[in-house]
Image (cartoon, grey):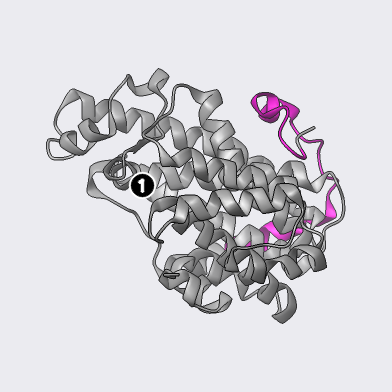
Amino acid sequence: MTFSESESLDPKAALAAYGKSFNWARRFLGHKMGSDAAVLYRFCRVLDDMADGDIIDGPKRLEYIREDLLAKRPANDPLLSGFQYFIEARQLPITVIIALIDGLLGDQKVVQIKDETELLRYCYRVAGTVGVLMCSILNCDDGKAKDYAIDLGIAMQLTNIARDVLEDAQMGRRYLPESWVGDITPKRIVEISKSPELESSKLICSGTQKLLELADKYYESGLVGCSYLPIRAHISISTAAVVYKKIGIKIVDKKFAWYEGRTFTKKSEKIKCSIQAFIFVHRRLLQVKPHNQKLHDTLRGFPYVR
């Protein structure tokens, strides 16, 4: 069996190589939670590599992993086999892992999202699920926290999509809803990127703006929910969120120029975001306002969505 680089690396090395924002935030978790977060990240990262075709027979392996999880039987795939002890030890909800895999399997065909509902449901599957899983890692047993964890995952995924419009199009994927940008194909997006002065390019810029405006609503909720976490986890997760939010701010500053490729945060910016996240911690002293259930109107039926 051929392994991808992410599958060959140990958890902390995988996080350092592929999840720079999360690796920065992991510093605040302490050894135990930081190590557990790295294990979860590596597992999710390898699943993502399977979906993206970076691993030979990746999609088939995803299906086998899903079948073994659904049947609650010993794993045949080495990735799941090595992770099953962790699932049991941290009591990770199997239904949520399956929902994550379902989202990744959906990326195997040409992706052309139809509307905002489909977009948010996709974001739940591939990122809101990770928020729920992280609650178990971060010793957060309060059921209410999962509402906010889902929102933070969705916000980060919306930021990812805004950052990766061109890169996703090159992989045959358009996550910008047709209801926002029309029925532009991924191939056409790649062509348009070479002529940013076109009206269709400006339409994609507008769609990117809508992504980030939608993300802001979910960031606002997700950051409030960090108050349910232990103090070190609160600092870490809010740091990761603020660093991710900074990516969106930089995209806004460059006027949504999606055709220029990925936007990154510098180390100096991560430091400033960390300071800002520390300031947010005072919210622990305030009563957490009730979750805005309207944010989940399109997600009914998914695990842990109330």
Q: Nearer the viewer, residue 141 or 237?
A: 141
The range drawn in magenta is 275-304
User: Most prominent secondary structure in the magenta stretch?
Assistant: helix
Q: Position of residue 35 (x, y in %)?
A: 67, 76
| Residue 283 visible in rendering | no
Q: Residues within 10 Å of mark 1 (few under 14, many from 20)?
A: many
> Residue at left 76%, top 58%?
282
Residue of label 1: 164
In the drawing, does residue 186 fall left or right of residue 128? left
Kind of element beneath mark 1: loop
> Residue at left 49%, top 51%?
60
When the figure is inspected, residue 98 is found, relative to residue 199, above or below; the finding is below
In the drawing, does residue 178 fall left or right of residue 228? left
When the figure is inspected, residue 230 is found, relative to residue 292, above or below; the finding is below
Q: Position of residue 41 (x, y in %)?
A: 59, 64
Q: Nearer the viewer, residue 32 or 295?
A: 32
> Residue at left 60%, top 41%?
125
Find out whether residue 256 is within the magenta segment: no
Q: Nearer the viewer, residue 288 or 87?
A: 87
Splitting the image into 4 quarters, where does residue 128 fall?
top right
Splitting the image into 4 quarters, where does residue 217 fall?
top right
When the figure is inspected, residue 252 is found, relative to residue 226, above or below; the finding is above
Q: Position of residue 273 (x, y in %)?
A: 53, 62
Placement of the N terminus among the 4 image quadrants: bottom left
Q: Nearer the viewer, residue 257 or 139?
A: 139
Find out whether residue 292 is within the magenta segment: yes
| Residue 9 visible in rendering | yes
Q: Amino acid at mark 1?
A: Asp
